[in-house]
Image (cartoon, rainbow, N blue to C red):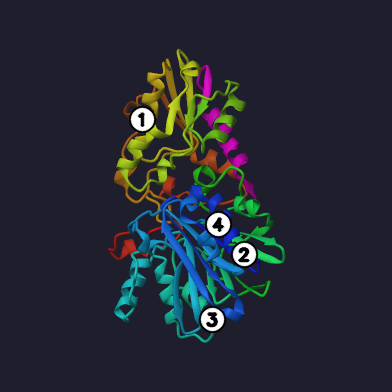
Amino acid sequence: MCGIVAVSGVPDAARLTFLALYSLQHRGQEAAGIVAVNGPEEGETRMHRATGLVADTFDEEVLSGLPGDSTLGHIRYSTAGGAGLHNAQPIHVRYSEGDLSVVHNGNLTNARDLRSKLVGEGALFQSSIDSEVIVHLIARSRREGVDAQIDDALSQLEGAFSVLITVGDTLYAARDPFGFRPLVMGRLDGGIVFASESCALDIVGADFLRDVEPGEVLKIEKGEITALRPLPPQGMPRPCIFELVYFARPDSSLWGISVDRARRAFGRQLAREHPVEADCVISVPDSANSSALGYAEESGVPFELGLIRNHYVGRTFIDPTQAGRDFKVRLKYSAVDEVLAGQRVVVVDDSLVRGTTSRGLVSLLREAGAREVHFRLASPPVRNPCYYGIDMPTRAELIAAERTPDEIAEHLGVDSLGYISLEGMQNAAGRDRTFCSACFSGEYPTPLVDLERGYEMVGSCG
């Protein structure tokens, strides 16, 4: 999962992009980058990328060296494809129609197939990320004009992509036909801002306009928004429900849904499906806070702050190394003994993927004196890899792929374990919507071209 931002037609756009990326830091902590276009007269494009957090990557000296009123920004965590600066974004090249820059959130399910064909035609790749395929497809298109070349490139992609593209100071924004990954649009002082989540619009003071629709392709030039030919529909939109479960910030709204309200609804449904006699409900902070509050509201069991999170340690789920996750459990969380000692505790978490963090947390709770530990999950068992941009690449890494809930409970060392049902979660999120839940159900909406043709499905989260 990654975060993307674009600012068009606003002076000092790089500073706004910095703020927006800062608010999206939860979506990736591996690398950050901004490319700035210094207006149509100068036409100069400058870029800065570095590994690490946004606040460590950009300072006043760096931002002052990125003048212009049009920018793209990106923060990254890699699902695969390797860490390192060579795989950071934005991707910037010069081609026949001008300076071309791209940022991408999502994973392409035909990236290896396209890359193999492009290499066969003489293309030279500088990274191992799937996003670079988009750049080559645009640059090598034989269509006339930039609009047609971008249409040609995007029409060849399968899988998940929310993309922002600049050619000179003209901006393009697009989502794949299923709309897996979010992309919102706002207006600021006559300019336009795009971002992965609405919280990024809030921090820069932009007024929310709407979501970019699945399959929509927009062109922004001199403050004017033009809708280009939409991408061919492939079925009902399938936004990723895991965005609501875990990735998005609770103060964001995605697809017209408040993330906080959705998570509270998950918690209430979870309490109805898996009640238990207990003394307190605690959350695994911070992504499960809203679900735990919902569980407490529905069950009548008091909500307590039993786990404290150290906010100077990154999100363990998106740490690319298993060793990093193991080590960070005790760095990241501490138990409140006075709350937990002698108590029957319901622990609400958003999801259970590998189980490493959860097993460590249960040990912390036992050490703090919890008499009983009942684990409740605000999403169903994750049994299948995600090929659309979430770090669930192989079944072997997923604790629920081959184990029953009772076996998982024994492995974690808890007194009971309960998952929300898939139907219950989907109804809680919105009965009038169809979500992608492939990681739970195994039903993939798009062709898995690379997998079908014998390529390793790795992607990279553009």
Tag 1: amino acid: Gly
Q: Secondary structure at mark 4?
A: helix
Q: How many numbered discs?
A: 4
Foreground: 103 or 423?
103
- State how far apart marks 1 and 4 are (Cα): 35 Å
Q: Residues within 10 Å of mark 2 (few under 14, many from 20)?
A: some
Counting residues from the start of the chain, the first of labels 1 and 4 encountered is: 4
Tag 2: amino acid: Asp
Q: Secondary structure at mark 2?
A: loop
Q: Is residue 373 left or right of residue 428?
A: left
Q: Quadrant of residue 389?
A: bottom left
Q: Which residue is mark 1?
A: 360
- State how far apart marks 3 and 2 are (Cα): 26 Å
- State how far apart marks 2 and 1 are (Cα): 45 Å
Counting residues from the start of the chain, the first of labels 3 and 2 encountered is: 2
Question: Which of labels 3 and 4 is toward the front?
Answer: 4
Q: Which residue is mark 3?
A: 146
Question: Which of labels 3 and 2 is toward the front?
Answer: 2
Q: Which residue is mark 2?
A: 12
